[in-house]
Amino acid sequence: MTDYAWQKSSYCQEGEACVHISAATPTTIHVTESANPTRAVLTTAPVAFAALLDALKAAHVTPR
């Protein structure tokens, strides 16, 4: 991984299905996945990341 201080998502599945997040600076959020964390790193602003999380939470449907 890069030199970012990565934090594993609290919603990780068992095994390798995890998202890692790094708040590198107050204005930068980095997101990657655990299967190959150095291959693709998404960089975004905290406001955009918060909007993504809000949209995901709103779309979440509890399985029956």
Image (tube, rainbow, N blue to C red):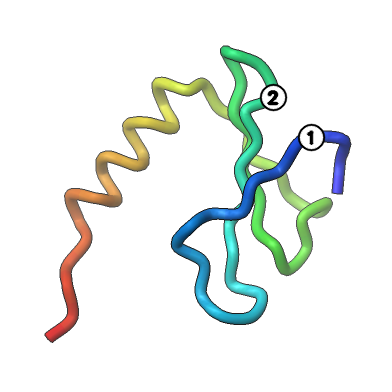
Q: Is residue 21 depicted above or below 9 in this figure? A: above
Q: Earlier in the sequence, mark 1 or mark 2?
A: 1
Estimate the x, y position of residue 23 in percent, counting from the top left.
62, 28
Pointer 1 with pointer 2, Cβ within 8 A: yes
Q: Residue at x 65, y 36 (%)?
A: 22
Amino acid on which disc 1 is placed: Tyr
Q: Which residue is mark 2?
A: 24
- Secondary structure of residue under mark 2: strand
Q: Residue at x 18, y 80 (%)?
A: 63
The residue nearer to you, when weighing 44 against 1, is 1
Q: Is residue 37 left or right of residue 47?
A: right
Q: Which residue is mark 1?
A: 4
Q: Residue at x 17, y 67 (%)?
A: 61
Which of the 4 image quarters holds residue 37? bottom right
Dot 1 alpha-carbon crowd within 10 angstroms: few under 14, some 14 to 19, many 20 or more = few
Amino acid on which disc 2 is placed: Ala
